[in-house]
Each structure stands twice: as structure tokens, then as C-alpha cells.
Image (cartoon, grey):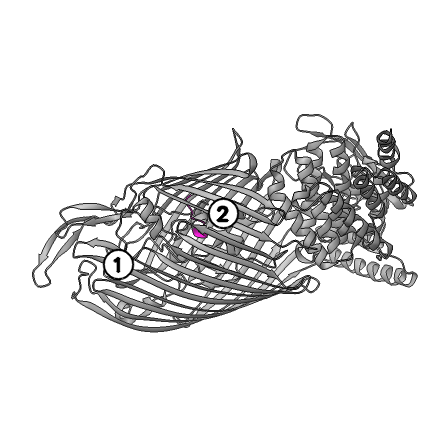
Amino acid sequence: MNRSSMLATFGVIITGITTATSARAQGQLTGTAKWADSASREIEAANAVGDLGRLTNAAAMIDRVLTVTPNDPSLLYYRSLALYRMASIYTGQKKREEAKRALDEADLLLEQATSKSPTADALALRSGVIGLMIGSSGNPMSGMTLGPKAAGLLDRAKELEPKNPRVWLVSGMSAMFTPKMFGGGTDKAEQDLRRALTYFETDQPTAPAPSWGRADAYIWLGQALHKNDRIDDARAAYEKALELQPENGWVRNVLLPSLDRAKK
Amino acid sequence: MKAAMRAACLAVISAGTLTAQSTVATPTRTVRGVVHGADARPLDAANVFLIETLEGVVTHEDGRFAIPTTATGPLTVIVRRLGFTEHRRLIAEGDTSALAITLEPSGVSLAPVAVQAGQYTAGEERGATLTPLEVVTTPGTAADVNRAIQSLPGIQAGDEGTALFVRGGDFTETRVFLNDAGLLTPVQLQSPAGTFTGTVDPFLLDGIFFSSGGFGARYGDALSGIASLRTQGRPSRSSATASAGLAALSGAAALKVSPSVSFRFAGNRSNLEPMFRLNGTRRDYNPPPHGYDLSGSAILNYRPTGEIKLFGVHQTNTLAFGVEEPSYGGDFSVNMDARAGVATWHDMFGAVAPTMTIAVSHNESGSDFGAYRLTNGSDHAQLFAQTEWQTALGVTVRVGGELDRLESDYKGSIPETGYDVKPGARTTVIASSETGNRSAAFAEADWRPFTQARLVAGVRTDHSTLTDLETVDPRLSAAWKTFGGLTLTAAWGVYHQIPDPLYFDDSLSAGAQLAPMRAKQQILGAQVGGEAQMLRVEAYDKHYDDLAQRTRDYDVVSDGTGHARGVDVFAKGKAPFGLTGRVSYSYVSSRRTDPDAGVVTRAPFDVTHTATVVAERSLLGGLRASLAYRYATGRPFTPVTGSTYDAEQSVYVPQYGAPMSERLPAFRRLDFSTSYYRQLTPGVQSVVFASLMNMLDRTNAQKYTYNPDYSRRSVMPSLFERSVYFGATITWLKENR
């Protein structure tokens, strides 16, 4: 190590210690935790309005920080979440190749994040990523190999944190796309999503731990209820989602109008 | 400079701000340019940033970017985009010209390089060469792990045995590990082509790591290859499986008692008699191969990162088949009884991940043929410990050690000469009891200077009481993911192995001083693609010294030398008509000291060309079909050119021609298998499978045998003529609530 690098390293340590000390005194986040927390807010805001550009920017920002701290689990998680959200939009736009790239990388990052110290949130998100891979692949046979993998990850997540609402959210979403004879279906989805909403009532994670998903749970619950022809219950669920995310264009412009059409 | 740069970045992150967003200072320069793909079209959504300050932008539809910065001095621009390989460009301080950056397409642009020279994995991990499904469904492997590994490049099979002859080396030079504990690979005096029984059931495994060379300092006492098998961990849910086939009945259960405690049990009873009855056989068996294996494991996951796993297995195998030698014809019988217990612990405390394995095993085996009658008992105890530490600067450091005690008893008699094996022939009485204690220590640094590069440097030292010599093995391995998804690999290393304890018996070695056998390996390779589609080419050169070998009269000679050079090719991917498949090809030239003639010539496992082609097709409704074709150049052998009659011993004494001057006929085999998967209910799955082995009914040669006066020779056929095998498996899965 030469003199300049020694000085620089010393500078990092001093900067880190002083920043952490002063921030702790103020109850603030520092370093990568701060970036992770900022990213989580940006991702959710961008997702609510379906803004692919903002999601791309959020993912890019985390990617830059990951260049220096490549194994930070929070940053790996939030970059994966951004990619997962981007892939959902790409899938809706029928951009299958773009969705596949985003999902492949999200899967890779989550594998890295969970290989040494798995968390329920990361395992569940990876299960969701693999579930979306099955849905967006266009190949029904992919479910045969990827389906058990997604289910296994979700099982591990449930074991680690049986009351994590995002785990049950992913479980409910997965049930929506799993035939009833294989243990899925809209009734099972409703059951899991209501369970998720119950757990969201007491979900108060400390930043930068994940806190997203409550609006998603109402949105997916609404879709499950709609499929069961419970139009009024579905509308109530969507309205709850709009209370949490008033700017959510998917609910306002797509899902609610679809209920109106169904009622006619 | 790089350390300083990295430290500066860490300072930015620690402060929790990026200069681009703090907007306090006035930019002094702007880095600008355009990003486009190989087809010259501008690329949007590319992440362009300066590594020194992490300032950056995301490109729009026109591919253009402009990054205002206050940074002085030279800067490094990094460009990343999904589906493309990362691009780095260094710009000088005074350089204000617009940059034109072309990105090359790749699979996953930011995937850390996982490939290493000589290494193949089978598992669910990213980068695995084979999936577990591909292992168990490879036609002709009879769901045997070793046979599946044989379909990888770098292995010269040449017959139907399960031995792993890796890159021109003997099968005893490849070491098999189960949960980090080494399994015994004793020498086979009567069957130099290796064993037909006794490998591990692949259904017990969830990961296989195979290295055909260039492996790291963690692995010792092996000259050529490593097969590291990992047993299944905690089940995600309780389940039970029953399987019935033409030659085997088996059952398995996984019991999840609580989220942290689970158990697995498996039993298998095999008997090839029904299969031989249905299909016929070229050999007389009395009895046909039969045996059982029982295994169990207890898994305790006491916290998310911590696991204790206890694994026990008991295997038996017995067979006898008719063998016609010039001096005697009769049954050659073999029996084997092996028990092993392995306890492993691993955890992670922050950046430190310790692992420990304690294993004990007891093996008994016996062989009987005419005057040859030998029993072997081995007791093996091992302790392995390793600590892995991920440092802040992207270097993973591994340090560890192992203690190994092997007590090996050989009792019986072996013929004094290889040509006279009839009952009553002159014999050498063996009553050998050798104990070898081996201790080893290793250290290894695994450095990823950036996402696309990896450098592993290590050293290990071993000492065995059998040789009373200490060895030091430095090893180096590097991989670099370049443009277009091309990964270049290289490895260099020194490897030592202690000869088998039997070789130290005075009645065989006649005072020969045996040293640790030594190999020096050099490998260069290249790979494009990932787990779904890849092409991999590797060239290698191995040099051997201090080889301990046995002659055809069972004497042990020392100081053998040799070398092996070759090229391995592996391709995997999609083919027309919905087929997926893989092709392995190996070329090798392997030469070593002939222990009988004392000259360097072709090695007995110098199988010049080996090729395996596997094609698979998923059909509608869970139906899957696979076809595999294997080809191997015939193994070299030393021909008998004449004989003289020894009236005193009533036996013809063969006269040998030039060592290893002829070859057996080439090995060819075509196998087919099919399976049908059906989910009967949400919790019950079934698989029906059938296979047709040696479809072309080719008679492959195991070796040549001679009539009593050596005037005529004939082929001793390998085990399987065209054979049908079928069975079904049903699995019940408990639903998690």
C-alpha cells in the first residue's frame, strides 16, 4: 500500500466514524443504509406511477454504489426490487426480452444476497422474480423446473419470518397464477393476501429494511375478488390501495374501470 | 492508485452523498459522448458513471450522455446496461473529446465471473454446468453419479466401469469428497479399469463439483481430479418417495420436524438378476451384482446462516462372474461393505464463515479368483476445518487444515506371477497392516478486482508418516470475462498424492523407497456463454514424477515419470426441433513409465479420443426423451506374442511384445431413456421411466483374454448387451401451511 492510498484509507475511516457518530446522535442513516433507504422510496414512488425512467434511474444509482460495496445486502435487495418492478412494466408492454434481462439480473443479485445470510424478504422477492420469469417466458414447460424452485424459496421465507407481510403478499400473488389443482387459485390467493394485510397492520420495519407492499396487497386482493365476481369487495380493495397510493395509475385507469365494465 | 480511488469512493458512500446531487461546487469539466450497440444503433437506459466520484447519468433514446464533474486528474468512465458487457474507458485530464462507446451483447451483463479452469458443477447454483435433473436423466448412466460425471470432458472412460480416469491419469488420482470428507479410492489389483459398484446415489445429492484439474489449495492428496459431492440439506417440506425398477427397489423420506430440525432417510436394494433374465447377458454371474445401501441424515438449522448436518451411509455390494484366464477359468467374486459417518458444521459471523467436518469410515472388501484371495479392511478418520473471511477490499481469504488417519489391513495371498493364477499356484502371502497419518494446512486468497475478473492464489503443505516427507504445493488460477461474453481462464499448480498404503508393504515393494507422487499442471481455457448455452475449450499439460506403480506380477516399483497433454471441448445449448443437448470431446496423449518394461510409453489409459453426445427433448404433457452416444478410442495394452511351457508349474509363460503397442477395439454405445412426469394431485407426483441401453447391441471389449498356450486371443465383452430397463417413482409432498 503506497502513501496516497494509506492516506485515502485513513480519510475513509475518519469520514466514516465522524459521519456515523454525528448521524447516530441525530438518529439518521449513514452510508449505504442511507442510499438503500433513498432508493426504496424512489422505487415505490416510481412504481406507483408506472414511471419506467425513474425506476431505471433508481436502479442505476444503486448500481453505481454497488460498484464500491458489491456485497451490501440492502443495496443488492433494492436493485433487485427495482429490476423486478421494471420487469413487471416490460411484461405489460410485451417487451419480453427486456423483462427477461431484468429478471435474470435480479435473480443473480438475490442469489448473491441470500447465499450467505438469507432474509425472508430477499427469499420472497427471489421467489416473486422466478414466478414472473415463468409468467413472462412464454414457455409453459418452464413452470416444471422453476415452479418448485420458487415454491422452495417461499417456504424458506415463511419459515424464517412466518409473519412477514411481504412473504404472504408474494405467496398470494403466486397463488393467483397457480391452478387450483396444484394448490393455488383465487380463494387461496385471497386467504394469503388477507393474511399479508393483517401482518401489515403491525409491520414497522426500521429503515432501510423493506417496508413496501401494502398497496400491492390491496391491488392483488382486488384482482382476486374481481375474478371471483365480488365486484363491490374488489372496488373496496382498490380504493384502499388508492388511499395509500393516490397517484397509482394502474388502479385508477385500468383496474377500477374494468370493474365498471364488469358491472355493466 | 486503485486503492486510493476505491477509498475515495468509500468516502463518498460513507458520507451518504453523491457529488452530482450535492451541487455545491461548480463543475470544471464535462465528460460527454454517445453509447451505441454493435449494430451502431444508440442505446438508451445505459448507466454511465465515473468510478472516482460515482457521478453519472442514464442515457435516453439518442444514447447521448454528459456528466458535469469537479473531479481533476484522469477519470474512468464505466458504462453498464442490461444485456451488454460492462465497458470501461480511461480518459486523460485534458481530454475533452466526445466519447463513442460501443457495448457488446452478453447474457447477463453484470454476472460475476464464476468459471474457473478445469471446473464443472452440477446443482441449482448459477453457473452450474449440469443441473441435477440432467445428471439423473443422462441415458446410460443408470442414475450413477460417476457415470454422469463421465459425460463431462476430460474423462477417459473407454469401458462401462464407473472409475474416473481424468486427463490421462489413473482413476486412483481422482479423489471423491462427500460433504468435505474424502472417500477412499483403493487400488484395484484385479480390475485396473476401475470399479463397477460403490458410488453414491445421485438422489441423495443436491450439488456436484467436479474439477478435471487446476483445483485450489483446499484439495490435497490428489494428482488429477476432484469430485466433491454435497448431500441434500434441509427439506422445504416433508415428503416420501417410493421407487421400483427392474433391478432396484428404493424408498426415501424427508421429515421436517420443525423449521430448524429435519431428517432424511433413504434405502435402496439393488439386484441385477431380473434385468439379466429379461435381457440376457454375455457373462455368467453367480450371483449377479446385488447389494443395498441405507443412509440417513439429521439437519439442524439453528439460525439462518448456521447448519449442523450429520450424514451416515452403509453400502454393500456383491457379485461374481465367470472369467477365463489362460491358466485358470472360474468365478471372480467381489464383495464390499462400506460404512461412513460425516458431521459437518458451517455458519457465518459477519464476514467470517467457518466450516468443520469430522468423518469416520470403515470399508471391508474381498476378492477371490483362483490363487488370488485378498481381503482389505480400512479405517479412515478425518478432521477438516476451514475459515473463510470476506475482506472489505473484495478479497476472500480461506485458511484451513486437515488431519487424516488411515489404517489399512490387507490379508490373503496373491499369485507370485500374473500369468499363473490357478488354485495351488505359487503365491505371496500378504499380511500387511499400514497406518498413515497425514496432516495438511492451506491458505488461499480469492480476489475479484472487478466484476469481470477473478484471481485465486493459494498454497498447501502436506506431511504423511508413510513417506515421512513434507510437500509444498503452490497453486494459481485466474479468470477474466472479456468482450462478447468470452471468459479466459488459466491455472497452474503443483499437486502431490501419497501412494496407496498397500504399496508400502515390504512383500510387494521389495524395499523400494516411495515418495509422494507429484504432478505439475498447466491449463489454458476459454468459455463463451453461460449455463443454458456455452462453449468451452481447455488445453492442458501435466507432468508426473515419483509415480508408484505395480507390475503385472503385483510388485511395486517407484520413480515412474510421465506426462499428459490434451484438449477438452464442451458445448451445451439448443439444437433444431426443440432439442437441447451437450457435446463433450477430449483429446489426450498420455505417456508414463511402463512398470514392467521400465520405459516411458503410452499409459494404459491413453484413450486418444473420447466423445459423448447427449440430446434431450421435452415433449408435451411432462414427457421427456434423451439419447446419448459415447465413443472412445480403444485402451492400449501390451500384447502377448508367444509362450513357453513351464513343466514344473504346469503353466504356459507368456512372452510380451512391445509395451502398450496395441489397442482394444474402440468403444461405442448408444443409449436412450424416456420419462413421463405427472402431478396426480397437488401433493402427489409420479414419474414413469424407461431406458434402452446399448441400443445398437455392440459388443464392446473389456480386455483380451487368451487360450491356455496364448496362441489365440478373444475379446472379453463388457457387461451390457442391448437391455431394457423400466420403473416408476411416486412422491408425496406434505403441504406447508
**In the shown orientation, is residue A40 left or right of residue A174?**
right
Q: Secondary structure at mark 2?
A: helix
Q: Tag 1, which chain?
A: B
Query: Residue B224 falls in which quadrant of the image?
Result: bottom left
Position of B105 relative to B558 (above/below): above
**Is B678 or B634 nearer to us in this picture?**
B678
Sequence-earlier tag: 1 or 2: 2
Q: Residues within 10 Å of mark 1 (few under 14, many from 20)?
A: some
Q: Mark 2 sits on what residue? A: B135
Q: Nearer the viewer, residue B690 or A57?
A: B690
Report the magenta residues as a range: B140-146
Q: Residue at x 85, y 29 (%)?
A: A261
Q: Residue furthest top?
A: B40
Q: Amino acid at mark 2?
A: Val
**Residue B90 forms part of the magenta stretch:** no
Percent x, y of residue A91: 73, 34
According to the picture, the residue beneath numbered tag 1 turns out to be B332
Q: Is residue A70 or residue A255 the one in the foreground?
A: A255
State whether residue B385 appears in this view: no
Decide whether the magenta segment is chiefly helix, strand or loop.
Answer: loop
Whole-percent x, y for residue B154 in the image: 43, 46
Indicate left or right for B461 with A242 as reference.
left
Could one spot residue B197 in this view of the protein? yes
Q: Quadrant of the C terminus of chain A?
A: top right
Q: Residues within 10 Å of mark 2 (few under 14, many from 20)?
A: many
Reply yes or no: does residue B145 show up in magenta.
yes
